Image (spheres, helix red, strand yellow):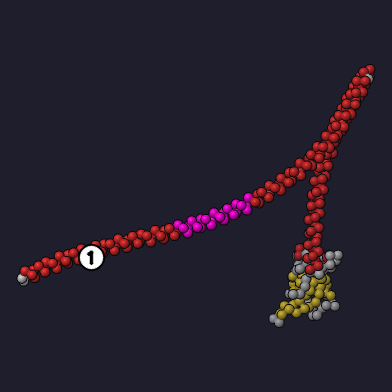
Amino acid sequence: MNLVGKILTVIIFVLSIIFMTMAMMTYATHQNWRVSATDLKTKLDTAKSENAKLASEKTDLETQLSEEKTNRDASLTKLSNELKLLKDQQEKREKALETTDKDKRQLVATLEAQQQELSRFRKEMDALRTAVDQARKDRDLHFNEVVKMTDELHQVVNEMSQLKTRNTELAADLAKMQNVMRHFNVDPNADVSLTPPDVKGQVTAVLGGGIVEISIGSDAGLRKGHKLEIYRTGSKGDAYVGRVEITKTEPDKAVGKIDPQFQKSDVVKGDRVATKLQ
């Protein structure tokens, strides 16, 4: 190898070292940018999460604020109603006080007249003093009676108000009940004592002579004179048997007589009874 070859070899070696150095620097710079981008992405995700959390907290705070506003309005309405009630009570008490003051003025006027009589008739001092004492006793008695009558009047007014309110409620309940009865075609004036309740049972014994015993009685609401329908359950469905009129009841059973006009077949033990057929 000549000198030129050695120089070229050295130059190539130096250039290789420079190229490797530049490659390492480029790789390091690329790695730094990647780490920075990852950090920025992490920070961005964190910021988005915090933003969503803050938005949720904002929504919760707005909901709480709305609820508190609603509660405040309800409280204000309640306080307003209570204030109105207190004003009404104050007006009633002021009227009662005016009545008491009027009576008191009348009593004072009477007392003043008696005192004037006492000053003009000195000679009758003892007799007039006795009369004044009696008048004072009468005044106190009258005042106590006025107070007692005022309390009784207030009590009567309160009871009347309660009775009016109860009367209004009963009238509303009566109107509702009449509407329901009209809806189901029930006559409000009809006698319901002979209408049996909605019950179901079965024939437990056939006693002969058209008399049967059933498994339900007065505890179920049955009374003498109630009429029930008898039917028999079979594979082909329910078959109508007849009608029984209750003649005697006990708490857990009853006895009835079969109505021959409605009898379709012989009644046997195990037949079903019900207020009405489905």
Is residue 206 something one can see in this rendering?
Answer: no
> Which image quarter holds the C terminus?
bottom right
Residue 55 is situated, as x and y percent measured from the top left of the image, at 50, 58
Residue 231 is situated, as x and y percent measured from the top left of the image, at 76, 76
Front-most of residues 235 and 102:
102
Q: Is residue 61 magenta?
A: yes
SS for tag 1?
helix
**Residue range corresponding to the magenta coloring:** 50-72
Front-most of residues 41 and 136:
41
Is residue 16 something one can see in this rendering?
Answer: yes
Above or below, comparing residue 74 to residue 128 in the picture: below
Q: Residue at x 57, y 56 (%)?
A: 63
Spot the residue most to the front.
4
Front-most of residues 85 and 226:
85
Residue 25 is situated, as x and y percent measured from the top left of the image, at 24, 62
Q: Is residue 154 magenta?
A: no
Relative to 132, is 83 on the left or the right?
left
> Which image quarter holds the N terminus?
bottom left
Question: What residue sits right under mark 1 in the picture?
Answer: 23
Relative to 248, is 78 on the left or the right?
left
Front-most of residues 102 and 178:
102
Quarter location, residue 126: top right
Relative to 4, is 172 on the left or the right?
right
Quarter location, residue 195: bottom right
**Residue type indicated by callout 1:** Ala
Spot the residue most to the bottom.
236
